[in-house]
Image (tube, grey):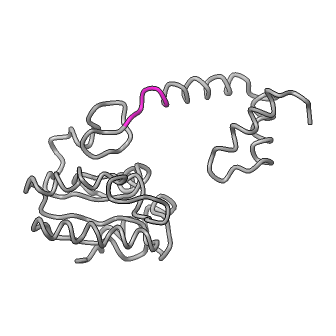
Amino acid sequence: MSDSSLLASLIEALRCLPGVGSRSAQRMAFHLLERDREGALRLSDRLREAVERIGHCKVCRTLTELEICRICADPGRQRDTLCVVETPAEVLAIEQATGYRGLYHVLMGRLSPLDGIGPEELGLDRLEERLASGEIREVILATNTTVEGEVTAHYIGEMAKTHGARTTRIAHGVPLGGELDHVDRGTLSHAFEGRREY
């Protein structure tokens, strides 16, 4: 490999992507430099613009360029139904795979005391405020079926019950230990339709 410190720095920077090890990062770097410099510049511009302009929705915490995301701002959404997910990728997966027309609350993670992730880090105070408003009648727990996801679902389920909200959990078709944004559309749609009381 070349002695170029810029090349080594680029390869190391590409390793920040999930599932990208040193060999994959090296292939990406060489591809961009040898075959697609224009694409590399476009990628660089879009990445910088996204990092600078995309933040979190003030209501649901999903990623958006706006103060309030298009879903929260849509007057046609069912305002009495709230789906709780772990990541913005799961909002996109549900939107693409189902006919769900309610609102969301994005945790940006799941409870994991060993990793120092408690209720404060997940914005559960904001969720509590939304539930306390009395507008939410059903909370759909769509956390992943990992141990931490189940603990998070239980915690939120108990919180929702104290505010008189019906609590359901998506079920059928989502494999134990599976991540929602890796489940195919048909399976996710079936799981969403088959949710149950929690």
Task: Residue 163: give x, y in percent of width and height.
Answer: 11, 65
Which quarter of the figure has residue 57? top left
The residue at the point 27 percent across, 59 percent down is 83
Which quarter of the figure has residue 152? bottom left
Count of all numbered marks drawn on residues in the image: 0
Q: Quadrant where the C terminus lies? A: bottom left
Q: Nearer the viewer, residue 121 or 18?
A: 121
67 lies above or below 183: above
Give the side of residue 100 with respect to residue 80, left or right: right
The residue at the point 18 percent across, 48 percent down is 77
Task: Residue 197: give x, y in percent of width and height.
Answer: 22, 77
Which segment did they paint magenta?
51-55
Which quarter of the figure has residue 160? bottom left
133 lies above or below 150: above
Task: Residue 34: give x, y in percent of width and height.
Answer: 82, 28
**Does 129 lie within the magenta span?**
no
Give the side of residue 74 with respect to residue 6, left or right: left
Task: Residue 29: give x, y in percent of width and height.
Answer: 77, 35
71 lies above or below 9: below
